[in-house]
Image: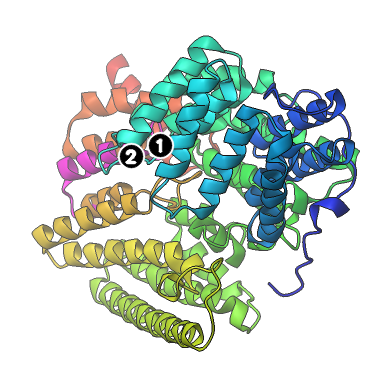
Amino acid sequence: MEGMEPIPPPDQLPAPVRMTGIGNSHIAIKATPEAQAWFDQGLSLLNDFWEYESMKAFEQAIRTDPKCAMCYWGLAQAAQFRGDDQKPYADKALEQARQLESKASKTDKLYIDAAVAESKEEAEDHSASIAIYRDLVKKAPKDIEARIHLANALRDGFDDDGNPRPGEKEGIEILEGVLKDAPNDSAANHYWIHAMEPSNHPERAIPSAALLASLAPNSGHMVHMPGHIYYRVGDYASADHWFAASTETDERYMREQHVDVDNDWNYAHNMMYGIANLMEQGRLNDANALSDRLAGARGHLMASLYVWNARDQISRLSLRLPVALRTGDWTTVLAMLDDAKIAESDNTAHLRFLREELRNFAAGMKALDEGDVATAQGASERMDAALWREQRDTKAEADKKADEKKAEAKAKKPDANKPPAAALNPDAETEPLMMALNVASMELHAGALLGQGKSADAKQLYEQAVRAEKKLGYHEPPFYIRPVAETEAEALMRAKDYPGAKAAYQAALIERPASGFELYGIAHADELAGSKAAAQTEYQAFLKAWPSADASLPQLVHARQQLGNAQSAAGR
């Protein structure tokens, strides 16, 4: 990225300070006592996903004991976490660890051998490293970290129904065992939250969410992590507490240690999650205020950190744009897009494309709200045509570069460290963005079909859009800003299909538990369907869910009015 400053190699990083309140990870390694202490600090920080400070600690351990093989292992792990720019240093550190294996313990060697195996594995096949970790656990059954590493190596995600795949299931069982044996292990509680949040039962991690911050109170990401679970179960107020606490923790660290935002990736991530969380509480003014602060959470390096994140790309067009999209304020969306200033360069091509596609989407959705189906259909056709052209051109460019790589491979001996040409995709970072726009395109087209009276075709396309939304995968916070089911519900409300709208709002409530947007929609659908008694109860549940929402929101005004009218009628 233009103007981006290079990350310094590990040996040029500032010397670390002794840190407390960052967790309690430990592996007994062959090293001097001082190196062991720095190693454990680096390991705790690594398990906190705090790679910048972790690299510093492992590098200090190496300075203290240059013959410590596992200290190089740790440096390799932290540098690898840091990103592609650090891969040469990660590879060099791992090779140094391998060369020092003769001075390491038997269990140290297994950790190193597993890391070497991982460095050579294909994306979907971790069988070699898993086998080594199994051997490590067998030889060192009391080593908590060995069991955690095996659990993480086994993880293979969840199926489309949210059920764990075989490796994921075994990894979860291993973590359960670790937490039983070491309930206060900071790393185990951290990874348990990550294991549970994409599942059908995130509530299983509530005990870890309640505990984790106390185990690592000076680690911004560990203080942030409880918010993941509280967001997933719909306890947005508790999530907000931890997101705010994480911001304070990170800002204190950066201020006291003179560290800039480029070296604290959690700072921006935490703000992005906080914004999403505030929106589900109806605290739109606070969400906008926090969005304004997001600009200062990105430095030269951070500017490209979330380039694959559709939500973050949208905020780059205008910081408050996600809030307007969440609420369906299409007039404001269009005004923000018109005001978005994007420099003309190759590096901004995807942002300019995103702006035009969002403009088509917002114009079409605004037209649907106004009952202008013809205009909405035209916007849908423009959006689809642009998506088709972009996908065609992206594929052509990828094919061209793959052919060039194949030609290079024939002309010279291939580099074993490079992936095969066919696997290269120069636009991989924009794929999630294209997937998200495809979902939006289906939403708009389905709305136009419904407006034309083609309800069966619209229902089928909405179902396809819901499946495509799920294909985006689990992300923190969700990539797709407003659930497809909620958009469908609003379209069905326009079509006066109130039972269908209520069912769609209830489906959206699964994705965003206790969200006031969905609770209000359910009550409003019942009100318009003539189910007055049900609507009164549902409006009360809605108001209970939004105790801190902006007082001027039309949903709050209408709900209070309806409950007030009901009380007046009962008193007559």
Which residue in the protein does label 2 denote? 158
How far across and down, in percent of the image, does residue 557 sit? Answer: 45, 37
* Residue positioned most to the front: 102
Q: Residue 158's image quarter? A: top left
Q: Is residue 353 above or below residue 451?
A: below
Instruction: Characterize the local packing of mark 2: few (<14), some (14-19) or many (20 or more) Cα atoms within 10 angstroms.
Output: many
Three-letter code for the amino acid on which mark 1 is drawn: Pro
Q: Which residues are magenta?
A: 494-517
Q: Is residue 35 above or below residue 409?
A: above
How far across and down, in percent of the image, does residue 463 sit? Answer: 20, 53
Left or right for 218, reference 374? right
In 3D space, how far apart are the residues under numbered discs 1 and 2 (Cα atoms)? 8 Å
Q: Residue 339's image quarter? A: bottom right
On-image quarter of the N terminus: bottom right
Which residue in the protein does label 1 denote? 198
The secondary element bearing badge 2 is classed as: loop
User: Is residue 507 found inside the magenta-colored segment of the image?
Assistant: yes
The residue sitting at 50% across, 74% down in the picture is: 426
How far across and down, in percent of the image, does residue 326 sit? Answer: 45, 51
Q: Main structural element of the magenta stretch: helix, strand or loop?
A: helix
